[in-house]
Amino acid sequence: MDKIVIQDLNLQYPTGPQSLKDINLSIPANAITVLFGPAGGGKSSLLRCVNRLNDIIDVKSLTGRILLDGENVLDPKVDVIALRRRVGMVFARPVVLPMSIRENMTYGLELAGEKRKSRLEDAVERGLKHAALWEEVRERLDDPAIALSGGQQQRLCLARVLANQPEVILLDEPTSGLDPISTGKVETALQELKKDYTVVIVPHSVQQAARIADYGAFFLQGELIEAAEGKELFTQPKVKRTEDYVEGRFG
């Protein structure tokens, strides 16, 4: 079953070439979908469209539809704050709030009006467990989040998104600055998370894309070149440009 369906999506910023050109893509529920390809292909722009982050920057034109459970999230009538609770996003560079680990986890919930301590504590533990961080920080929840390692901070950012219990998690190169051990922990966490969430990720390398993809979509200069199940796309791509990129002939 498809969680997100993208139809005829076009995006143009005020300068530069068109970022997205007639994108049509279905993203299944409870799976990891990777968007991969060379820099400048439109992958991050597509993520920003899904939870309306492009609203906060200058866009020349944006047309098409992005259906989340059948509802067009690009409709001006959509409650963007409610949308971003359903569709959380983790960026390449971890940005922790200047407060404790616990407060980082509860901040968004408290802003949304949650005051019950039991609910907040449950959200802290659940989110940290899902992000494979609970065992490492359970005895130091009141320590400053900035004291965590880079890999731990990135997993805290993921846990913070999960505390809000979204339906979809978008990740934009979340392991690009991490060591191999931390990267492995994030990848393992994602395999568990897909049981409960729809995961869409821009990986930091084609090797990572091949490791984690249930489904994959190859982007090149704003165009969707090919989309298929991960095993097929990375072993038997049907399009020559996909094959050349996967095999390292360019990129």
Image (tube, grey):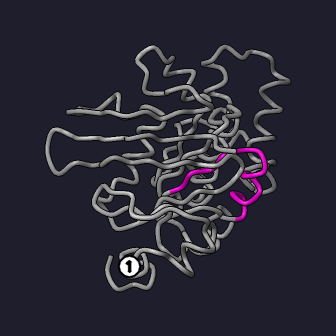
The residue drawn where x is 51% and y is 17% is: 79
Number of numbered discs on residues: 1
Identify residue type, mark 1: Lys
Q: Position of residue 107 (x, y in %)?
A: 62, 27
Q: Foreground residue, 230 or 156?
A: 230
Image-quadrant location for residue 11? top left
**Secondary structure type for disc 1:** helix
Q: Position of residue 231 (x, y in %)?
A: 63, 74
Q: Where the N terminus falls, by quadrant?
A: top right
Q: Which range is magenta?
A: 188-201
Q: Where the C terminus falls, by quadrant?
A: bottom left
Give above or below for 53 relative to 112.
Answer: below
The residue drawn where x is 33% and y is 63% is: 220
Image-quadrant location for residue 216? bottom right
Q: Seen in the image, is 9 located left or right of residue 36?
A: left
Estimate how packed mark 1 is, as few (under 14), some (14 to 19) or many (20 or more) residues with alpha carbons within 10 Å.
Answer: few
Residue carrying label 1: 240
Give above or below for 116 relative to 153.
Answer: above
